[in-house]
Image (spheres, grey):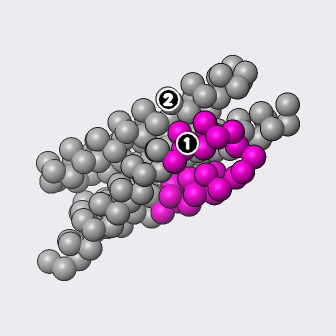
Amino acid sequence: MEAMSNTTSIINDIIETLKDGQQGFRAAAEDVQSSDLKTLFSRYSLQRSQFAGELQTIVQSQGESEPETKGSIAGAVHRGWIDLKAALTNKDEHAILAECERGEDFAVSAYEKAINDESLPADVRETLRAQFVEIEAAHDRIRDLRDSLAVK
């Protein structure tokens, strides 16, 4: 029973991180002028929602009737900072990308920690690994876009 509780706790933490990312990317999509960035951020927001849904299903299969459905308080503060930064910098896309990368740094770290937790069942770790590949790719894409705007 304790292993199931630990698994549920770890997955719920990842769900919070995904919900933070979903909401952060949605806010970023609203703050940028570039249609390419709007599309990219909207796609990442949807991806985070889908990943959270996959993990909520796993939590329910573990016997938890109420999987995590919201982001964290720290994530809400981070999203508020994106809004403030965008307003203060006239919706500076470099600043928004830098904030998105900061959020993605946290997501990458959270996934790495969860994947390395040997107490998680193999099927859960495999789901997390598959999602991590895409989370890491998004992080790298955002970092590269941020760097490309810094050069201009």
Q: Identify the residue at image location x=75%, y=46%.
A: 119
Residue 48: give x, y in percent of width and height.
42, 40
Which quadrant of the rendered structure holds the N terminus? top right
CA distance separating discs 1 and 2: 16 Å
Task: Work out which residue is located at the far right of the displayed protein and give it.
Answer: 2
* Disc nearest the viewer among 1 and 2: 1
Closer to us: 72 or 119: 119
Q: Give the labeled residue for mark 1.
A: 126
Magenta: predominant secondary structure element?
helix
Element type at mark 1: helix
One can see residue 20 in this view: no
Q: Identify the residue at image location x=61%, y=36%.
A: 123
10 is within the stretch colored magenta: no
Compared to 45, does 145 lie above or below?
A: below
Which quadrant of the rendered structure holds the C terminus? bottom left
Q: Which mark is residue 53?
A: 2
Element type at mark 2: helix
